[in-house]
Image (spheres, helix red, strand yellow):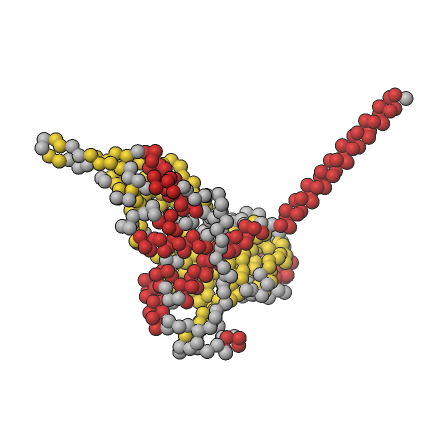
Amino acid sequence: MKDYIKLKIMGETEWNMIKRSIFFLLFLIFSMNCFATNKIIGNIMSKNLEQQQVFIVDKGEKKSYLLEIKNDNLKIIKEFNDIIIGAGNGDKLKVGDLKTPVGIYYVTGYIPPSKLSSIYGTGAFPLNYPNFVDKLNGKTGYGIWIHGRDPKEDKQASKGCVVLHNKDIDFLKGVNFINTPVIITEHISYTDLMNYNSEKSYWLNFLNEYYESWKNNDINRLSKLIHVKFKDSKHSNYSEYIKRKKRLMELYPEKTIIFDNIKIFKENDSEVVYDFDQYYSAPNITTFGTKRLYLIKEVDDFKIMAEEFIAKPTPDKYKNIAKNEPKQTLPITTSKIEDNNTAHKQIEDNKKDNATQPIVKTATKKSDSKLKKPELSYDEKDIKQFVQDWAEAWMSKDIDRYISFYSEDFKSGGLDYNQWKEDKAGKFSRIRNIKVEISNIKIKPINNNIEITFVQHYQTEAMKNKGLKKLILNKTDKGLKIISEGWSPIK
């Protein structure tokens, strides 16, 4: 009898353990499903967009998705598995390298199977590779398509095309796939709602700065957003583009500009494309079309590398706008981003004052009745504190506090003190959080200045990079001030 009771107790205990295990497993599966449903594809954002479909290719996972943006909400329409990509790894750079390109492209048409070899299956959708910015970067090649496959063959790689199952190509035939944007990336960027909205605000604020500088005839502000290697669809370079914009601003200071159906496509952390409808009206001139701005990452921010404009007939809703009367334009953003970064508090006044006290001393010494050049001495601890305080001011996004570390004689990258302040103020207004980490600080005197080099990790909600930063400091009657700044990337 005792053995029976003991056996029964053991059985109940084991059963309870099994039930707990099952409960935990179900909870884990439920949690994973909740996480999966909360994941958002961070490569696509929009504003004032009623409806748009987008195709995205994940080269690493060999998957692709057809998505729909409706009233600025993104959802997956269909998932395509077991896709085939190019035999070569990485981005396509030249003809014959067998690589599938990464970037933002558009479907340009459809080729039926009757005009194709059987290796293309039930049809092909050509892409506009090389696109506008690919050509500027010297990329070559042609014939990059999304197409089907020959059911009699079992190929595991293509010559650079994206290859789907024939049933998937047949599906795309029925969804008006021509002109659909196509994002090809090494890995899709997944995020959560909070970070998605934060990054979306960042990119809308960047576009808003472009818009405001144009609308308000601020050519200096506009020029800071443009890359020095810029080209537009009229083959104008940076200098020609800025001169033309300035001339038009002077000729037509009063104008109507409307951005609508704004789409933001990210291939990765270093390439971004804005695609939107643009209406422009000034006395004796009215244009409408699709504007595409291609951005690339440069040091700690993005610059517009290329601008493409595709003219279209003006929609009826714009035809009643008087050409000579400015109109309230559609807002790109409702407000500037609030600074929610509370991690970096204001440094006490006495610490701030101490950071800018003179910490460089010069000494002269006579030898053989000749005066030698002054030798530089410094307190290494104080200089390192200066750098840390400078980094904190940068992270705080307090432009007055940040610029107090710079000399009025400062110059860097073609910008003087006032231009540097204006440039940074613009970035601070559209970046929500800035994180700067500094390591491996090295200090050495150069004549009457101090050269400081260090490894800098920079990160915002939209980008991150690592580089070698160089600051040149000069002693002034107000303490040490930065007179020059340089940066180079570190892989």
- Quarter location, residue 375: top left
Residue 424 at x, y percent in the picture? 38, 52
Name, please, the residue furthest toward the front.
350
Identify the residue shown where x is 13% and y is 32%: 366
Position of the C terminus, as image quadrant, is: top left
Note whether 258 is above or below 484 in the view shown. below
Closer-to-camera residue (57/190): 190
Identify the residue shown where x is 42% and y is 64%: 212
Name, please, the residue furthest toward the right.
1
- Would residue 197 be visible to someone looking at this image? yes
Note whether 479 is above or below 339 in the view shown. above
Tally the marks: 0
Residue 166 at x, y percent in the picture? 63, 58
Residue 368 at x, y percent in the picture? 9, 31
Residue 389 vs residue 36: left or right? Answer: left
Identify the residue shown where x is 84% and y is 23%: 6
Closer-to-camera residue (206/166): 206
Position of the N terminus, as image quadrant, is: top right
Residue 366 vs residue 205: left or right? Answer: left
- Quarter location, residue 78: bottom right
Residue 70 vs residue 30: left or right? Answer: left
Note whether 163 is above or below 14 in the view shown. below
- Would residue 121 be visible to someone looking at this image? no
Residue 16 at x, y percent in the picture? 78, 33
